[in-house]
Amino acid sequence: MSALTPRPGIMKIAPYVPGKDSVDGKETIAKLSSNEGALGPSPKAMAAYAQAASELHRYPDGASDKLRTAIGRHYGLDAARIICGSGSDEILNLLVRAYCGPGDELLYSQYGFLMYPINALGVGATPVPAPENGYRADVDAMLAKVTDKTRVVCLANPNNPTGSYVTKDEVRRLQAGLPKNVLLVIDAAYAEYVSKNDYESGVELVDQAENVVMTRTFSKIYGMGGLRLGWMYGPAGIVDTISRLRQPFNVNLAAQMAGVAALEDIAHTDASRAHNDLWLPWLSAEANRLGLAPLPSVGNFLTIGFGSKERAAAANDWLMNDGLIPRMIAGYGMAEHLRITIGTEAEVKAVRDSLQRFVAAGK
Ligand SMILES: *Cc1c(COP(=O)(O)O)cnc(C)c1O
C-alpha cells in the first residue's frame, strides 16, 4: 500500500498568506495590509448584524433571496442571475471547480490576484500567467497564451496588488478573442471605487455573452471582510451550474442581513468613495514628492515602488516599527513594492510622515 497522497497539484500550492494584523512588541497604529474599507462597516449593517444574534439557531435562507433581491435592486440586475457566496473567494473557487480540471489551463495576468493560480492548482489544472506591460494586464499577451487547453481566464479589474485597470474596450477585445468554450471571470472587487469613463465593471459584457461572469465583494468598499460575503452575476447557464455545486447554506444568516442593510446605506458607501477619492491621490502625490514610485491606482490602496527589494523590505520594517502595517507583495513577484491600504485620514497621514522620515534618514 502506498502512503496517503493528496490529489495532484495541491502540494504545489504556496498557501495564501493574508496581510499581517499585528507588529511584534509594538502597538498597532494601523492595519493597512488587507484593503479593508477605511470607514469600516455601515452603522446600519452593524445593527442588522446585532439583530441576527437572536436568530442564530435558524439556518439561513439557502438561496439568499432577500440579499439577491437587494443586490439586484441596487445594481439594476436580474436577481435570478445573481449567486451569493462566502466572500467572492468562494465564488472564484466554485467557478474554477465547475469549469476547470486536471490537464486544463487557467489563464491570468502576471500580477493578477494570487487566488487564481491557487484555485487552478487545487483542481489539478495548470495556472498560466501572461506577461503584463507596466504593471497592467496586457490583453494581447493574454490572448497569445490561449491554447486548446484554456478553460478559464481570470481578470481582476481593477487588479490587486497593482491597482491598475483595463478599459472596457480592452475587456471586450479579450472576450471577443476567446473561444466560446472558455469562461472569462471578471473579478471587480474594487469596482465601486472606480470613476473612470472608460471603465466598466463587467455587467454589460455579462449581458451580451454566454461565457462571462462578474464577481463582486462586500469586503472592500462595504467594509465587511470579517463577515465573508461576495456575489457573482452571470448568464443563466453558469448560474445554474454554480447553483448545483455550491453548498446549500454557503452564506451565513448574519452576512445576509448585514449585506441588505449595507446596500441600503448609500450615504455610507458614498462617504467611503469620497474618502478614497480624497486620500488616494493625496498619498500618491506625497509618495511622488518623496521620490518614491507609486503605481497609478484606482483601488483603495496604493502600491509604491522603492527601487529595490532591499529598500522595500527596509521601508516595510520602518513602517512596522511605527505601528503601520503595509503588505509585502514579494509573493506576487513584486518584491520592490509595498502595497498600502488607504486608511483613515490619520492613518494615511501617519504613513506619509513615516515614509518622510524614512527618506530623510537616507534609507
Ligand atoms: C479582496 C479581493 C477579493 C476577495 O474578496 P472576498 O470577497 O473577501 O473573498 C477578490 N479579488 C480581489 C482582486 C481582491 O482584492
Image (cartoon, helix red, strand yellow):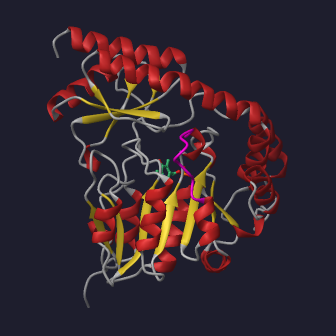
Is 311 situated left or right of 242 in this image?
A: left
Please give the name of the residue rendered at 38% of the width and 35% of the height, measured from the top-left corner. Answer: 296
Q: Quadrant of the N terminus?
A: bottom left
Residue 320 picture quarter:
top left
Residue 325 picture quarter:
top left
Q: Name the spot of residue 312 as percent of width and height, x first.
A: 22, 30
Q: Name the spot of residue 91 as percent of width and height, x first.
A: 56, 64
Q: Name the spot of residue 167 as percent of width and height, x first.
A: 46, 51
Magenta residues (range): 194-202
Please give the name of the residue rendered at 59% of the width and 54% of the height, measured from the top-left corner. Answer: 216
Residue toward you, 9 or 161: 161
Is 268 situated left or right of 156 in this image?
A: right
Is 179 situated left or right of 240 in this image?
A: left
User: Magenta stretch mostly in which secondary structure?
Assistant: loop
Please give the name of the residue rendered at 71% of the width and 50% of the height, measured from the top-left corner. Answer: 255
Residue toward you, 280 or 138: 138
Compared to residue 179, the image places residue 313 above or below, namely: above
Q: Is residue 241 visible?
A: yes
Q: Residue furthest bottom?
A: 1
Q: Is residue 195 magenta?
A: yes
